[in-house]
Image (cartoon, rainbow, N blue to C red):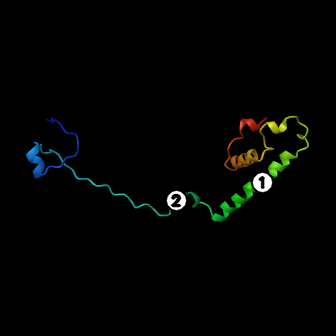
Amino acid sequence: EVDLVAAPLATDAHRETVSDFTLPYYYEKSGIIIKKPDPSYSTKLFDPLNPMVYICIGISLPVTTFFLFLFEKFNPFYRNVAGRMKIRGLHHFSDSFFYMYGALFCQDMPEILEE
C-alpha cells in the first residue's frame, strides 16, 4: 500500500479505480516564450572588426614572433652564456610566440621570461 506519491500522475478513469486521488486546489498552466536562436550567433565574436583586421593579425603574429625569435636566438650579448639553451626564454620559438600573443592581448610577461 502506498500512502504518498511524489510524481506527476494524471487522473484518468483506470487510475481512479486503483487508487484514490485528491483534486489539486491550485492549477496553473504556464508557458515560456523565448526567441529563436540567431543562426549567426556563432560569429558574434568576430563581428566587431572587419575580416581584413583578423587576417592582418593572423599574418603579423607569426611574422613578428619569428623575428623576435631570431633576434633573441642570435643576440651577441647572450651568445656566450653557458647553459642558455637549457633554460626557457625568448630564444625558444614557443616562448616567443606566447610572449607576442600575450602582448597582443595586453597580458603580463610570465615571471620565467623576466630573468
Which residue appears at 10% of the width and 47% of the height?
A: 16
Q: Which image quadrant: the N terminus?
A: top left
Residue type indicated by callout 1:
Thr
Q: Answer whether labels 1 and 2 touch (C-beta < 8 Å).
A: no
Q: Position of residue 84 (x, y in %)?
A: 84, 37
Dot 2 crowding, Cα within 10 Å, few <14, some 14–19, many 20+ = few
Q: Which residue is mark 1?
A: 64
Percent position (x, y) of residue 40? 50, 63
Left or right relative to 15: residue 84: right
Q: Residue at x 67, y 44 (%)?
A: 107
Q: Is residue 105 left or right of residue 85?
A: left
- CA gap between label 1 and label 2 equals 29 Å
Residue, x 71% and y 38% (percent of image)?
110
Q: Earlier in the sequence, mark 1 or mark 2?
A: 2
Q: Is residue 15 left or right of residue 99?
A: left
Crowd around label 1: few <14 · some 14–19 · many ≥20 (10 Å): some
Residue 43: quadrant of the picture: bottom right
Quarter of the image for residue 7 reads top left
Q: Name the residue that disc number 2 marks.
A: 42
Q: Residue furthest left?
A: 17
Q: Which mark is residue 50?
A: none
